[in-house]
Each structure stands twice: as structure tokens, then as C-alpha cells.
Image (cartoon, rainbow, N blue to C red):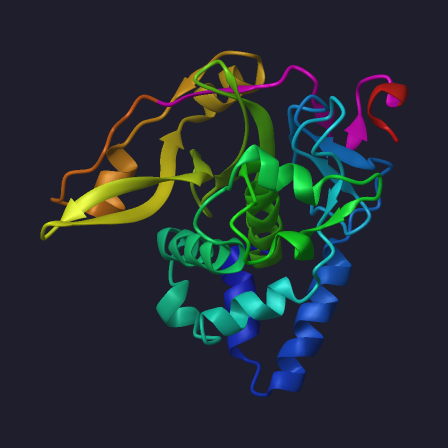
Amino acid sequence: MTFNEFKEEYKKLQTPEERDTFIKNRIEALMDNSKVKRIGLNLCGSYNGFISPDMGVCSNASGYFEDMHMDDMNVYRDFMNFIDNDIDKYMYGEPMAIYSIQHFIWDYFGLNAGGIVDRFNIYCGNEPVSIKELKGNDVAACSERSAMVQNLLKFLGFDSEIAFGKLNNHELHAYVIFRPENDNNRILYDPMNPVKYEADGKNYYCPGISMMSEEQYTQLKNGEPYTFDYNLVKKIYTRTYPCSEEKRVYTCDEVKFKNGERDVDSNKIAK
């Protein structure tokens, strides 16, 4: 199901019961049946599937911030309610859909990522952490936010993947890459780092998106850095208003998944 197909199908639904059934069936169709059980920083370069509730997402697989599970199955219904089930208004195109997703994850997690002590308090035990434990407490960081974005994009019918690597060559970082419908290019979307701009003397924030060519995408997946380009943000969101343009350089880890199967020793990433 593509993004446009999703919109056309959803617009036909008239009652809450019909919408709930559609969402349930959509999630069941997306469930990943591969043998991959864990993804994340220090584990893989990217993952292009729907992140199932039993799959661990690691912010850092070196002994802490491990195995967060995307097990809040109300997220998809909550997102549609967040946009008042108004597809034409809130998702008439990819830029508006991303804008709606950005505001939804702010509403779900809070605006900030919190400090490392706050995160340790969540990831303090040996049991997997539920995404529900991060709801509304300003603790979720790049991996949790990107994991939710990845699942929302897959839910809506986008060709997307969550990527794991570094930001500016030193900070472990997760972000998302997706392909707009009927377009040969891709868009890097960093839900953890929106772009600040000033309008009428006030500061605002919009989604951090950057257009990348297929060549740039291939180079990134082969280990080359990608430098964030602000032209798309300025064209779509900020228009004539000035925005911050700090340098952002993204890399992708060398260990990658191919077609949903592991291409590295399973003992290194399977728990």
C-alpha cells in the first residue's frame, strides 16, 4: 500500500469501528516476520521494515540503553485522532504529513530528550523497556523518536528506513530516510533535530528534512558522509523567514541489514 493508496482507503471509512478495524488490519499486514530481533546503534546501519513489538531497538548496544520495544499499539490510532482523521487537511502531501508526524511525536514524548541520568532511570533494569515508559516525560532521544517515525511512515505507506550512525562524526545518532511517492530522490528526516527559524520576532521549529539524490543515498550507505542541505526546509517550511543553518554531517554504520536478513554473524546482534 502506497501513501496515496492509504489516504484513499482511509477516506472511505465512516465510523470509529471501521477505522479501528482498518488500523488493526494494516498493522497486522506490516508485522515483520524476519529473524531480526534487535536493531540499533552499534548493531546495524539501517532497517527498512516495520518495527514489530517484539523487536528490540537499542540506543546503545554496549551495555546500556538497550532493547526498547515499540509495543504501544494505540500509537497509530492516536496519530489519526491527532490529525482529527482529516487526511486532506493534514496529509495532502509528504511535507504536511512529516509536519504532522513531527508534532505528534512532540505531543507523545515531549519536546526535549532529557539528561543521561533521566534515561538511566528508565533503562535501569534487565527487562526490555516499553515505549510507553517514555511517553510524556521528555526522555526519549533519537533512537526512540526515529523508531516511532519509522513505524508511522510505514503505517502510512512510505518507502522508509531507520538509519543508525553518527552526527558530526562524534555523536551516536539515529534518523530516518524515506522516498517521496513518484520521486527518484530521497529525504533524510531527523526527528530529533528540528530546524529553528524566526518569524515576527518569535522562534519556531519545523521538521529537519533534507533532499538527497540516489547517488548521495548510495554513498551514505557505503560509508561516505552526507551533509544536510537546508534548501528543502527553506522552500517548504520557513519560506522567507531566516532559519538556523548549523552544519550537520550524517554517517551510517557499516553493519547493514539486507532485505530483512542479517548479513553479519547472528551471534553479534541476536539476543
- Using the rendered image of the protein, determine whether residue 245 is visible from the camera's viewpoint: yes
Give the answer, above or below, for where 185 lies relative to 103: above
- Picture coordinates of residue 183, whole percent (x, y): 42, 41
2 left or right of 67 in image: left
Give the answer, above or below, for where 234 lies relative to 262: below
For the C terminus, which image quadrant?
A: top right
- Using the rendered image of the protein, determine whether residue 8 is visible from the camera's viewpoint: no
For the N terminus, which image quadrant?
A: bottom right
Seen at 60% across and 36% down, the residue is 117
In the depicted view, which residue is nearer to us: 20 or 143?
A: 143
- Picture coordinates of residue 11, whole percent (x, y): 51, 76
Seen at 48% across and 70% down, the residue is 82
Give the answer, above or below, for where 41 lies relative to 124: above
Q: Quadrant of residue 213?
A: top left
121 left or right of 192 in image: right
The magenta-colored residue range is: 248-266
In the depicted view, which residue is nearer to us: 32 or 164?
A: 164
